[in-house]
Image (cartoon, grey):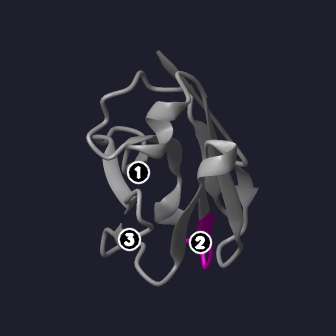
Amino acid sequence: QVQLVESGGGLVQPGGSLRLSCAASGVIFHFNFNAMGWYRQAPGKERELVATITTGGTTNYVESVKDRFTISRDNAKNTVYLQMNSLKPEDTAVYYCNTRDSKWNWGQGTQVTVSS
């Protein structure tokens, strides 16, 4: 069983930046063989997948975050990152990581609030 722990969220002004981290523990070899994703859930909305990265490093983004967010992974550390720049109030949400097909148990997420 894999456990996911997200961190790095906080309160930031519009236009600011944050870097989120997601560390996987448990059956570690699973991490290297899975495409990973960052998801977010805003109040009153469905959870959405915003960025993915394959085992080979190919990335993909939802249109609303393209050119502002960058997903990366460090397989040696079993960690996936999300660099978020030019943040907007509409980016406010709880951010989670999981496999691209969300097959692992969800972590607690990390709150990102973009507000002046």
Q: Estimate the x, y position of residue 32 in percent, counting from the top left.
A: 48, 44
- Residue at far top of view: 1
Instruction: Tell me the element at label 3.
Output: loop
Query: Disc 3 and disc 1: Cα gap in Å?
Result: 12 Å
Disc 1 crowd rating (10 Å Cα; few below 14, some 14-19, many 20+) is many
Q: Is residue 29 above or below residue 69?
A: above
Amino acid type of the residue that numbered disc 3 sits on in the rendered structure:
Thr
* Residues at circles 3 and 1 in contact by the CB criterion of under 8 Å: no
Instruction: Tell me the element at label 2.
Output: loop
- Residue at far bottom of view: 67
Q: Which residue is mark 2?
A: 87
Q: Is residue 77 above or below residue 27?
A: below
Q: Estimate the x, y position of residue 70 in percent, counting from the top left.
A: 53, 72
The quadrant where residue 5 appears: top right
User: Tag on residue 37?
Assistant: 1
* Residues at circles 2 and 1 in contact by the CB criterion of under 8 Å: no
Query: Disc 2 and disc 1: Cα gap in Å?
Result: 19 Å
Figure disc tally: 3
The quadrant in which the C terminus is found is bottom right
Please name the residue shown 31% across and 42% down the image: 45
Mark 3 / mark 1, whichever is N-terminal: 1
Main SS, magenta region, reads loop
Q: Is residue 80 magenta?
A: no
Mark 2 / mark 1, whichever is N-terminal: 1
* Residue range highlighted in magenta: 83-88
Q: Is residue 86 magenta?
A: yes
Instruction: Tell me the element at label 1.
Output: strand
Q: Which residue is mark 3?
A: 58
Q: Which label sits in the foreground, 2 or 1?
A: 1
Q: Which label sits in the foreground, 3 or 1?
A: 3
Amino acid type of the residue that numbered disc 1 sits on in the rendered structure:
Gly
